[in-house]
Amino acid sequence: MQQRAAIACALAVDPDIIFMDEPFGALDALTRIKMQDEISNIQRLQKKTILFVTHDIEEAVFLADRIVIMAHGKIKSSIQVNLGEHRNRTGDDFSRVRNTVFAEFEVLGYTSFAAER
């Protein structure tokens, strides 16, 4: 509930850019998916720029137009996500992008990454 209230407060001031740092980390899997859907809808309908920090690769692929992978505080890789507005978490294109991100982590060594939409 606290995450939802924090998101509502952030949106209430109608910012052009929204920064979200692990906002769904404490949520159960089903609530997390619902909140991801809501954030995606808000971005699509209100045309907000959202900088979303997450350690969940599938979450990044679902929410981002670009995924930036960082290691030791530096940008190591940037991956364009060209999946359109309505994303299918079980589709082949989604899996391909997810696998590309996983492959980058294997090459670079995982620390953290950010997603932007």
Image: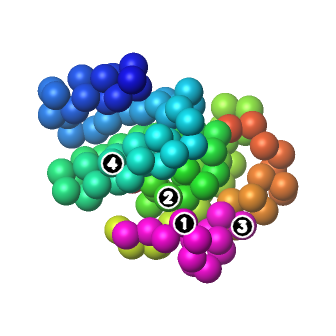
- Which class describes the residues within 10 Å of circle 4: few (<14), some (14-19), or many (20+)? few
**Residue 33 seen:** yes
Q: Amino acid at mark 3?
A: Asn
Question: Which residue is depicted at the point 38% across and 33% down?
Answer: 19
Residue 9 in the image, given as x and y percentages of width and height: 24, 23
For mark 4, what is the residue? Answer: 38
Residue at left 28%, top 54%?
A: 41
**Percent x, y for residue 55?**
64, 40
Kind of residue indicated by mark 1: Arg
Nearer-N-terminus badge (2/3): 2
What residue did someone put label 2 on?
62
The x, y position of residue 95, in whole percent, is 65, 71
Which portion, as a residue range, is magenta? Answer: 86-99
Crowding at mark 3 (Cα within 10 Å: few <14, some 14-19, many 20+): some
Residue located beneath label 1 in the image: 89
| Residue contact between numbered discs 1 and 2, judged by CB atoms under 8 Å | yes
